[in-house]
Image: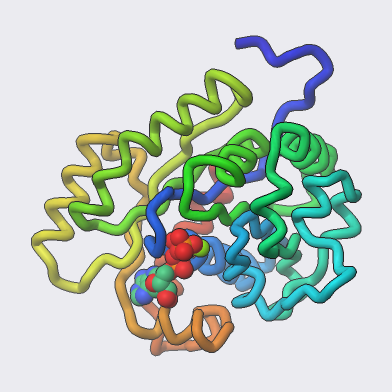
Amino acid sequence: MPRSAGRPAPARRAVAILNQKGGVGKTTVTLGLAAAASAAGRRVLVMDLDPQASCTWVLGNEPVDGDVVVADVLAGAPLDEAIVAAGWDDAISLVPGSAATADAVDAAGTERLRTALAALPDDAYDAILVDCPPTLGGATRSALTAARHALIVVDPSALGLRGIGSLADAVDGVWEGDNPDLDLCGVVVNRVPAVSSEAERRIDELGRIVGRSTIWRPTVPQRVIVNQAIGERRPIHAYGSRAADVTHAFDDLWKRLRRTVK
Ligand SMILES: Nc1ncnc2c1ncn2[C@@H]1O[C@H](COP(=O)(O)OP(=O)(O)OP(=O)(O)O)[C@@H](O)[C@H]1O
Ligand SMILES: [Mg+2]
């Protein structure tokens, strides 16, 4: 479908990180990639489109009344007024989320978000990571309309795979309707137990559904330290050798993401 006249292409380096299933690790993967980018000396913008605003909280930011948040950008505030340095690290910029996002997401807000992201200079950030809520409507549709890439996060369980079809259909729906530039760039498998033939079977099954090359490697191991890092609101890279396998996974996934958005 041709892009309607005058409508800008979506931000080339923006990636919507999504799954309608809750708790699969969308926020964990967004933050793991941001931490890996920062460790590699790169700059990222994290946009928190989830009204739960977990990503904002874990990054050490807690907007107060009067702060410009993503809901304000959806309502027409300039994007640069909403961008702040993340509490973790100056290399990570953040557009904070808040409960107000749920009411601010509509067609006009989505177009404003898309236009604002598209207007950022290509070299402003090495990637723009958009953390989505566990839904296929509202904010997730906005993210898919405003971003050039969609990255699905799944957990390797039977229930984790059940929604993949409708998820791929939702990406296709936005691609056909609102964003012909949208590309389903990959699937990150998170929470993979150290030894589990069940998880291996599910990853094989996922490969048959989405295509083996769509699954990004490595997968992200399930580790208590990930949960601890989220609870302590610190980057996984701050835990040194205790989190080595997880940080290496995110470092490799970041390299893959960088090649994708280049
Ligand atoms: N690889 C992992 N190992 C151990 N715990 C993990 C891992 N990934 C995520 N978790 C834990 O699972 C919980 C849910 O993760 P997270 O919040 O990232 O999921 P989500 O998909 O963003 O959830 P929501 O749909 O509510 O936004 C968190 O407590 C997190 O610490
Ligand atoms: Mg989340």
Q: Quadrant of the C terminus?
A: top right
Question: Which residue is more in the foreground, 9 or 158?
Answer: 158
Residue 6 locus on image (x, y percent) = 83, 17
Query: Who's the residue at 82% across and 67% down the image?
Result: 84
Res 228 → quadrant: bottom left
Q: Quadrant of residue 219?
A: bottom left
Residue at image point 62% right, 66% down: 53
Is 48 located above or below residue 248 in the figure? above
Q: Horizontal placement of 241 versus 46: left or right? A: left
Residue 90 on image: x %, y %: 77, 74
Question: Could one spot residue 44 in this view of the protein?
Answer: no
Residues 179 and 187: in front is: 179
Please say if 18 is above or below 62. above
Which image quarter: residue 11?
Answer: top right
Residue 8 sits above or below residue 30 on the image: above
Asked whether residue 228 appears in the rendered view, the answer is yes
Residue 232 as seen in the image, left or right of residue 118: left
Q: Is residue 240 left or right of residue 145?
A: left
Which residue is nearer to you in this view: 76 or 126? 76
Q: Position of residue 83 (x, y in %)?
A: 82, 61
- Up-down relation of residue 119 to residue 24 (above or below): above
Residue 171 location (% of width, % of height): 47, 32
Residue 143 left/right relative to 172: right
Name the quadrant of the N terminus: top right
